[in-house]
Image: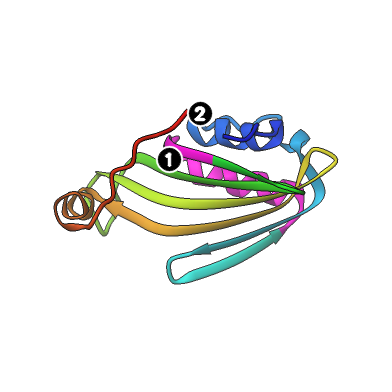
């Protein structure tokens, strides 16, 4: 695995801890955030709006990040990951465990996040996760190194 830049690692740490104080130090003032989530896409510009969105994502609960894999590029890199958490429920559904697969694309400038693009496959509840475990085709690979 490539060496994860400090700014990207700080984002990953925030996803797991829910602690975003100081993360703005790792984001440029004119940063672009572009998020594609199921049936929606939104964008923000600016460090404060980006940090506010990060806080919102973890305001109910932090996520357990699993299967994170960083691949570096000439100006940043990509983190593929799974996030797991306890959804507190709302008027539409009871509390439940949920999981999502995401790809986070980072462009860095002077070691800071200048652009963050998120692609999310959706949040899957326990029923969907069980169905995936039981029915979805899978490939088992042996990790090298």
Q: To which residue does mark 2 refer? A: 17
Q: Choose top left, top right, bottom left or bottom right for residue 97.
A: top left
Left or right: 26 as drawn, with respect to 13: right
Q: How dense is the environment of label 2, judged by Cα within 10 Å: few (below 14), some, or many (20 and up)?
A: some
Q: Nearer the viewer, residue 19 or 122?
A: 122
- Which of the two discs, 1 and 2, sits closer to the camera? 2
Magenta-span inclusion, residue 3: no
Q: Is residue 87 visible?
A: no
Q: CA distance from mark 1 to mark 2?
A: 12 Å
* Image coordinates for residue 54, horizontal then vertical, percent: 58, 44
Q: Which contiguous range is marked in magenta?
A: 45-69
- Crowding at label 1, few (<14), some or many (≥20) Cα neighbours within 10 Å? few
**From the viewer's perspective, is residue 49 above or below residue 21?**
below
Query: Which label was assigned to residue 35?
Result: none
Label 1, on which residue? 60
Residue at 23%, 57% (x, y): give it.
Answer: 137
């Amino acid at each position: 695995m490539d060496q994860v830049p400090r700014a990207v690692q700080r984002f990953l740490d925030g996803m797991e801890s829910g602690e975003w104080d100081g993360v703005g130090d790792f984001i440029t003032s004119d940063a672009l955030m572009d998020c594609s989530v199921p049936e929606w896409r939104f964008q923000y510009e600016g460090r404060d709006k980006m940090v506010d969105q990060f806080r919102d994502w973890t305001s109910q609960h932090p996520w357990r990040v699993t299967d994170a894999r960083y691949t570096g590029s000439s100006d940043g890199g990509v983190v593929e990951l799974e996030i797991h958490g306890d959804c507190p429920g709302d008027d539409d559904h009871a509390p439940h465990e949920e999981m999502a697969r995401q790809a986070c694309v980072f462009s860095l400038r002077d070691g800071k996040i200048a652009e963050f693009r998120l692609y999310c496959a959706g949040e899957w509840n326990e029923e969907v996760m069980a169905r995936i475990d039981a029915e979805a085709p899978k490939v088992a690979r042996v990790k090298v190194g």
